[in-house]
Amino acid sequence: MSIQELEARKRKVEEELKEIEAERRKAEAELAKQAEKKKMEEKKAEERKQKPARERPADWDKYVPVSARKQQVEVNGRKNVQFVTGLGSYARDIKLAISKFGEAVILARGVAISRAVDLSQHKSLEAEGIVIKDVKIGHEDIEREGRERRVAEIKIVLVKVGG
C-alpha cells in the first residue's frame, strides 16, 4: 500500500469516527432530555401528593352537597335510569341544617347545578318560608387522570324568614 492510500484510508476512518461521535452526542442529548422529562413528571407527581385536600369549613353540617349521580334500575323488565336521591331527601337535609345553624348552603358542581337550582325552589321549602339569601357562582380547577379541567360550581345560601 502506498502512502496516499493509507492517508485516504486514515481520512475515511476519521470521518467515520466523527459520524460516530456525532451520533453518540445526539443519543446522549436525547437521554438527557428523557431524564429531564421524567424528573419533571416526578416533580409534578410529588406536588400533587403534597397539594392539600380541599378543606371543609368548621360548620360543614350546614352544607348540602347535591349530586347528579345516576344508577341503573330495572322496572318491569326494562332498564330505566333514575336518580339515586330525590329532591325530597335533600330538602329534608336543608330543613335540618336550617334548624341547627339558621342557614343552609347548597353546593353543586357541573351537571348537578340544575338540580341544585331546582332544589332551592322546592315547594316544601317554600311552604316553610325558606328563601334564597345569597347565590355564589364560581369554578374550580380539578385534576383527574393527569388532565386539568375547570368545573363550574354554585353555592346557594338558604335561610328561613318569618316564624
Image (cartoon, rainbow, N blue to C red):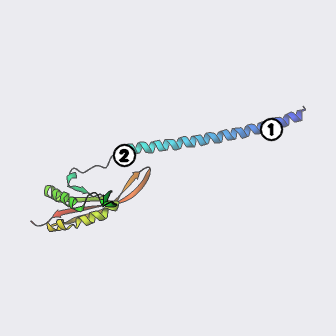
Farthest-out residue, left: 163
Q: Residues within 10 Å of mark 2 (few under 14, many from 20)?
A: few
Residue drawn at 77 percent across, 37 percent down: 14
- Labels 2 & 1 near each other (Cβ < 8 A): no
Residue 48 falls in image quadrant: top left
Q: Is there any visible trace of residue 156 in the rendered image?
A: yes
State which tag comes first along the sequence, 2 or 1: 1
Q: Position of residue 121 (x, y in %)?
A: 22, 67
> In the image, what residue type sits under mark 1?
Lys
Q: Position of residue 143 (x, y in %)?
A: 40, 51
Secondary structure beneath disc 2?
A: loop
Check disc 1 and report the residue beneath it: 12
Front one among 85 and 39: 85
Q: Residues within 10 Å of mark 1 (few under 14, many from 20)?
A: few
Residue 88 falls in image quadrant: bottom left
Front one among 150 and 47: 150
In-image side of 13 versus 77 (left or right): right
Residue drawn at 22 percent across, 52 percent down: 60
In-image side of 144 versus 134 (left or right): right
In-image side of 18 versus 35 (left or right): right
Distance between the Cα atoms at labels 2 and 1?
58 Å
Q: Position of residue 107 (x, y in %)?
A: 27, 58
Q: Quadrant of the image for the N terminus? A: top right
Q: Is residue 7 above or below residue 120?
A: above
Q: Which mark is residue 27?
A: none
Q: Is there any visible trace of residue 153 in the rendered image?
A: no
Farthest-out residue, right: 2
Check disc 2 and report the residue beneath it: 51
